[in-house]
Image (cartoon, grey):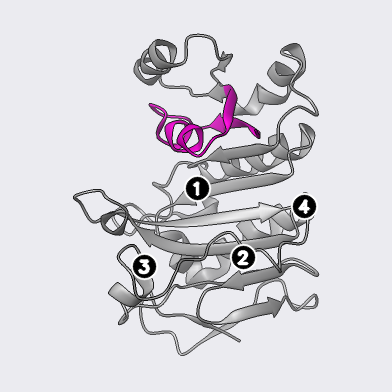
């Protein structure tokens, strides 16, 4: 059984999903007071902290260093959402994602799972997504996968597209995580064949796997991979 800490926990969506998959929640971080009430009700025995910026010190106090396998979190999206101001990484919210990545590194988690709106992929012409990938690679999570998934294909009666990013310390080339069986209910790629997952990445020697395009060794010279054939926020082909 793997253990995980949930950052930006909200009311525990990630937490519930990971628990249903057989993992154990050993810590939660959430700043919103109302959301904290929900977390305390459903996870009364799990340590709860209120600030990702001081989460490393909290983890030390709760003896979590070296005892966390996975760190997950949906960091705030207002800065990159197509419905927001599109402030990009210049907005303050992205730095919370960096705090989350640093937390995963400090507790020696082997895997980090991040979630955000698809607008992250197109923000600042893809460069902002490159910054996220770079930060993960610099923290040691050098095998990185990402994919846009839609909740309507996973038993939820609504369309809710989100990009999921999985970074691993170990090389998972032979056992990628973000894959699905072809031509069955639940495969958002075949059900939404007119759309492509959009991606841009950066970080020296990072291997990034994207469904439909295969594996790519990131150019260590450029700060971000260039995108070509840019059409819309769901159609960027990595060069």
Tell which tag, 3 or 2, sits nearer the viewer: 3
* Sequence-wise first label, 4 or 3: 4
Tell me which residue sits at (59%, 14%) in the image.
47
Q: Is the residue 48 above or below the residue 212 in the image?
A: above
x, y percentage for residue 137? 74, 57
Q: How far apart are marks 1 and 2 (CA)?
A: 16 Å
> Residue 200 at x, y = what percent?
57, 72
Q: What element carries label 3?
A: loop
Which residue bears the numbered disc 2?
130
How many numbered circles are shown? 4
Where does label 1 land, which residue?
91
Residue in front for this viewpoint, 87 or 192 = 192
Q: Name the residue under label 3.
A: 187
**Of callouts 3 and 2, which one flags the residue occurring earlier in the amino acid sequence?**
2
Q: Residue 169, which numbered label?
A: 4
As helix, strand or loop, the secondary structure at mark 2 comes to: helix
Q: Residues within 10 Å of mark 3 (few under 14, many from 20)?
A: some
**Residue 187 figure quarter:** bottom left
Placement of 12 over or under 114, stated as above or below = above
- Residue interval drawn in magenta: 1-27
């Amino acid at each position: 059984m793997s253990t995980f800490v949930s950052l930006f926990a909200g009311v525990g969506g990630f937490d519930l999903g990971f628990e249903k998959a057989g993992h154990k929640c050993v810590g939660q971080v959430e700043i919103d007071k109302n959301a904290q009430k929900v977390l305390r009700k459903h996870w009364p025995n799990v340590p709860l902290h209120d600030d990702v910026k001081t989460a490393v010190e909290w983890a030390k106090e709760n003896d979590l260093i070296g005892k966390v396998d996975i760190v997950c979190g949906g960091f705030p999206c207002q800065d990159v959402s197509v419905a927001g101001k599109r402030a990009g990484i210049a907005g303050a919210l992205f730095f919370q994602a960096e705090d989350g990545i640093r937390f995963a590194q400090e507790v020696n988690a082997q895997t980090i799972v991040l979630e955000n709106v698809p607008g992250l992929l197109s923000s600042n012409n893809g460069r902002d997504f490159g910054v996220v990938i770079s930060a993960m690679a610099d923290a040691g999570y050098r095998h990185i996968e990402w994919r846009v998934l839609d909740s309507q294909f996973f038993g939820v009666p609504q369309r809710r597209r989100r990009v999921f990013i999985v970074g691993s310390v170990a090389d998972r080339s032979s056992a990628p995580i973000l894959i699905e069986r072809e031509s069955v209910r639940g495969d958002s790629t075949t059900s939404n064949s007119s759309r492509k997952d959009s991606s841009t990445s950066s970080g020296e020697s990072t291997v990034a796997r994207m469904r439909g395009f295969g594996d790519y060794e990131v150019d260590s010279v450029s700060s971000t991979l260039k995108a070509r054939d840019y059409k819309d926020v769901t159609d960027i082909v990595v060069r």
